[in-house]
Image (tube, helix red, strand yellow):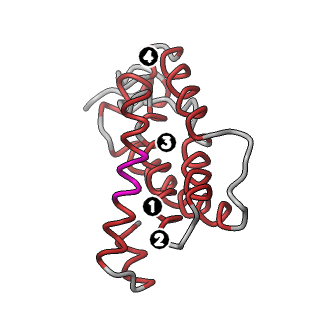
Amino acid sequence: MLNHLQQSRNFSDIRILRALATAGLIGNIVKHNASISGAEVGCQGEVGVACAMASAAANQLFGGSPAQIEYAAEMGLEHHLGMTCDPVCGLVQIPCIERNAYAAARALDANLFSTFTDGIHRVSFDKVVQVMKQTGHDLPSLYKETSEGGLAKDYKQM
């Protein structure tokens, strides 16, 4: 996504590096306070966090305020709460790659939405991280990178 934005919008390398730093901060907040592991909290910890990171990075690139950046990250993660991890035959091709592609598009949407606000919203990013952690712990292990539940349940390796 950042490569696409750099190419299509002619952002400088330094602006892309700052956006990557913003994304890294968001990822570290989640890693420190919850998890980024699909094995621990399901796909919400992988795809959801990646979406939050990309949302924050995009918003920072387009000049968002700290409140808008946090709001973009919050939306990016919030809309992936409860996402299970169910790779078909243990392969990341299905549905993981597709989920990440959709999450990249969602990240741009979260950026756009938060840009049209003053950044004030009811649910904080920190609260969404707490909820994601609890949701992940409540998910049965069947839905955490085991290839035994969800979409993966009816498929066998050939």
Between discs 1 and 3, the one toward the N terminus: 3
Q: Residue at x 50, y 49 (%)?
A: 52
Q: Which of the image's four quarters has the C terminus? A: top left
Q: Amino acid at mark 1?
A: Ala
Between discs 4 and 3, the one toward the N terminus: 3
What range of the chain is rendered magenta? 21-26
Marker disc for residue 57: 1
* Res. 86 image quadrant: top left
Magenta segment's dominant SS is helix
| Tag 2 and tag 4, C-beta contact below 8 Å | no
Q: Amino acid at mark 4?
A: Leu
Q: Amino acid at mark 2?
A: Leu
1 vs 3, front mark: 1
Please tell me whether mark 1 sits on a helix, a strand or a loop. helix
Between discs 1 and 4, the one toward the N terminus: 1
| Vertical comparison of 120 with 150: above or below | below
Magenta stretch: includes residue 137? no
Spatial separation of the CA atoms under disc 4 and disc 3 = 19 Å
Marker disc for residue 48: 3
Which residue is denoted by mark 2 in the rendering? 61
Which residue is denoted by mark 4 in the rendering? 142
Marker disc for residue 21: none
Q: Which of the image's four quarters has the N terminus? A: bottom left
